[in-house]
Image: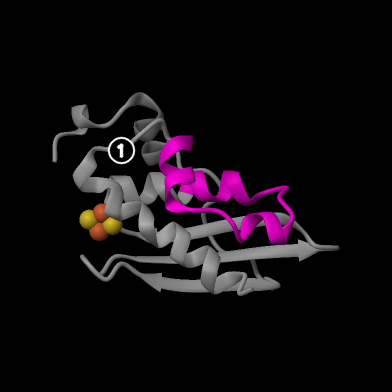
């Protein structure tokens, strides 16, 4: 897919992903796989007193997946866990200013990672 199909915010988060890597001793974590393409996201987080102090991702995936993971970490940091549980992939897409229709599926793993890392 040509990069010109992505808006500047998506390109920035793809080329300069925020909060990458893995926390050494996370309090919460998830490893999720996109059921459509097989791409993977590992999310690790540190929670103290119900607040997400740190969130990091390692992503094996396309530009949209990498940008979505980056957006996810920005959305999670500083949120209360109960607030984070309400995050949907649509929030990730909105944070990025939109994704091409056929790449929305690449943001779904972000929501799956939240569900797995912070079960209700
Ligand atoms: Fe697999 Fe985008 S093609 S997440």
Helix, strand or loop under label 1:
loop
**Within 10 Å of the Cα at label 1, are there few (<14), some (14-19), or many (20+) other Cα atoms?**
many
| Residue 23 percent across, percent down from the top left | 63, 65
Pick the residue in front: 14 or 99.
99
* 37 is higher (above) or lower (below) than 7: below
The residue located at (48%, 36%) in the rendering is 95
Residue 8, picture quadrant: top left
| x 37%, y 58%: residue | 108
- Please state which of residues 36 and 67 is positioned toward the viewer in this rendering: 36
Residue 71 is one of the magenta-drawn residues: yes
**In the image, what residue occupies the spot 22% across and 41% down?**
101
Q: Position of residue 18 (x, y in %)?
A: 53, 43
Question: Which residue carries the number 1 mark?
Answer: 99
**Number of numbered discs overlaid on the protein picture:** 1
Instruction: Give x and y (percent) for residue 58.
Output: 46, 61
The quarter of the image holding the C terminus is bottom right
| Residue 67 part of the magenta segment | no
Res. 50 image quadrant: bottom right
Q: Quadrant of ligand 1?
A: bottom left
Identified at 58% across, 71% down, the residue is: 117
Give percent across and percent down for residue 59: 40, 59
User: What secondary structure predominates along the stretch shown in magenta?
Assistant: helix
Bounds of the magenta segment? 70-95
């Amino acid at each position: 897919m040509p990069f010109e199909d992505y808006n500047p915010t998506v390109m920035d988060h793809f080329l300069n992903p925020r909060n990458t890597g893995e926390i050494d001793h996370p309090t919460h974590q998830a490893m999720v796989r996109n059921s459509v393409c097989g791409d993977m996201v590992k999310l690790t987080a540190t929670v103290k007193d119900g607040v997400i102090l740190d969130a990091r991702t390692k992503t094996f995936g396309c530009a949209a997946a990498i940008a979505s993971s980056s957006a996810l970490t920005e959305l999670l940091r500083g949120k209360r866990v109960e607030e984070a549980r309400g995050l949907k992939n649509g929030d990730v897409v909105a944070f990025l200013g939109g994704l091409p229709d056929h790449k929305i599926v690449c943001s779904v793993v972000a929501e799956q990672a939240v569900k797995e890392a912070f079960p209700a």
